[in-house]
Image (spheres, rainbow, N blue to C red):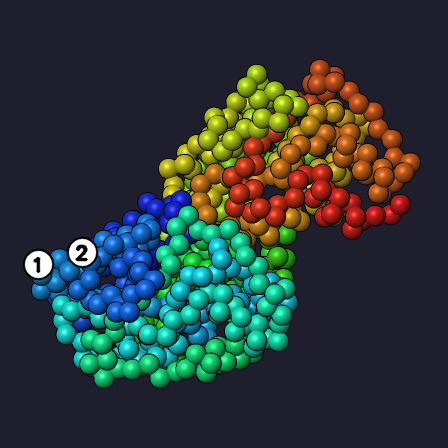
Amino acid sequence: MHFAAQTHVDNSFGNSFEFTKNNIYGTHVLLEACKVTGQIRRFIHVSTDEVYGETEEDAIVGNHEASQLLPTNPYSATKAGAEMLVMAYGRSYGLPVITTRGNNVYGPNQFPEKLIPKFILLAMRGKPLPIHGDGSNVRSYLYCEDVAEAFEVILHKGEVGHVYNIGTKKERRVIDVAKDMCQLFNMDPESSIKFVENRPFNDQRYFLDDEKLKSLGWSERTTWQEGLKKTMDWYTSNPDWWGDVSGALLPHPRMLMMPGGVERVVDVPENIQSDSPHAAVNSSQFRKVSPVQKTIPNKQSLKFLIYGKTGWIGGLLGKLCEKQGIQYEYGKGRLENRSQLLEDIQKNKPTHVFNSAGITGRPNVDWCESHKTETIRTNVSGTLTLADVCKEHGILMINFATGCIFEYDTAHPEGSGIGFKEEDTPNFTGSFYSKTKAMVEELLKEYDNVCTLRVRMPISSDLNNPRNFITKIARYDKVVNIPNSMTILDELLPISIEMAKRNLKGIWNFTNPGVVSHNEVLELYKKYINPEFKWKNFTLEEQARVIVAPRSNNELDMTKLKKEFPELLSIKESLIKYVFEPNKKV
């Protein structure tokens, strides 16, 4: 049974190539593998009612299995394309294929991006229920146990080469679903329902003719009221089943990815007003039909392998994993020792690897100027070796890098608000440390399993840590006064974990938006921590006389990260909230 697919309709509008790769190419790979084995007795391809496109509002007869396919969004178009491949393999190679197209499903265990579990969890938290557009869109909902029974019937009684609709004639407007939910939780619909921006295109109605499946002996058995009550009872009894799902409960949730680089294997269109026919078909009843084990991710299915145990960021990552209930281990191998890294991977079997190990120099980057071989060995060779080992094992590596590979220039002048973007070429080569970091970042672009996070001048609420930027400059007699992008670890390290959960890849500027100068930081230190604190400034020329290697000063463009995490605070707001307010002594 082939449930696997990229399914977020909203994301398909902006990331359609990924849908083509997974839904069409992925199906092709699976079909070819089944053809090669020659042992498959049934290949059941799980498609969606969305391949038919929008049904007329006044239609009294639903789409039957021979109806024309008229998909209206990139997601449904790729599902229709996959169906064509399935049909071709059935005719060309005799593969015993059956295709199903189903209405929306709901029930226990369903991931809370979907309409009904989303509404339930929001209602449990006393939050408003968001509805795309005016809520007039009509959908048909089937309880998961009924859908599981449908697949059992199709598996044993379905005819090879045929298509079967799994549907119901009982339709509901999204606004009515929200009102039913308000009634279950004794909420006032007027104050509890919130209308939000609609999708670029949102089909008004999907309506199926399910007589063909009924002729095999299947029928819907669970009433709407009964199914809704069962679903609500399960979520109220298991509120933490999915862990932290705050991102999924947004009106327009971003893609949440499974460990290992794939999305949820169930075929669920990402649509706040539509839950696919198969999102919850992983109940115990469904397991009678298929031996495939449940693979929907939760926090227990994550396991992080962290390199950099003795480092500042590595230590904080471990504490965050403990707090979030995520399994983790620290890597024991040296980054430059491939056999040790392989042993770590094989022993711990992680879903993700975090690399916070590296040489920055003690007490500062000047150390690297006289220890170039050691710096290359870890920062370049070691990082590349770890990325390559992870690539071989299909593991995403979150790599903590640096943004100290740029310096203000004529295109990005100091104070202009024009920051360096992820795709910009590094222009700072003043320190050997920065050279190695720029070098390895460029090479890591060839690895599609790496997420590079450019950290700058990291700060945390632990003002006793000698690596903390604030702790450093508070101990200097003199400081330069230049605005810079900086990273508040208390806010951004949890985001790095969320990025791992979403399996985000590529290069990301990893600082808070905006810049703050050394003087502004110390003014806050004086205001919140020590009113007697004093300091002096000196120029870059004066600084150059007391350091070995020049320092990087720049502003990074934070548009990309801010778009992914709109709640990210500006640098000054984050400094006050996460660093100075918790340590306030004045």
Residue receiving disc 2: 85
Give the vertical position of 127 relative to 512 (above or below). Answer: below
Q: Which residue: 85% across, 43% down?
A: 529
Give the vertical position of 342 relative to 531 (above or below). Answer: below
Outermost residue to the right: 532
Which of the two labelled residues, at mark 2 and mark 1, occupies the earlier sequence position? 2
Do we see residue 157 in this rendering? yes
Residue receiving disc 1: 92
Is there a contact, CB below 8 Å, between mark 2 and mark 1?
Answer: no
Give the left or right position of residue 2, taking residue 96 as reference.
Answer: right
Quarter of the image where the N terminus is located: bottom left
* Image coords of residue 438 (percent x, y): 50, 30
Q: Amino acid at mark 2?
A: Leu
* Image coords of residue 19 (percent x, y): 33, 50
Do we see residue 334 in this rendering? no
Question: Residue 281: which quarter of the image?
Answer: bottom left
Outermost residue to the front: 58
Q: Which residue: 33% across, 77% down?
A: 148
Q: Which residue: 33% across, 68% down?
A: 103
Question: Residue 505: which quarter of the image?
Answer: top left
Q: Amino acid at mark 1?
A: Ser
Quarter of the image where the C terminus is located: top right
- Give the Cα distance between marks 2 and 1: 10 Å
* Image coords of residue 190 (percent x, y): 61, 65
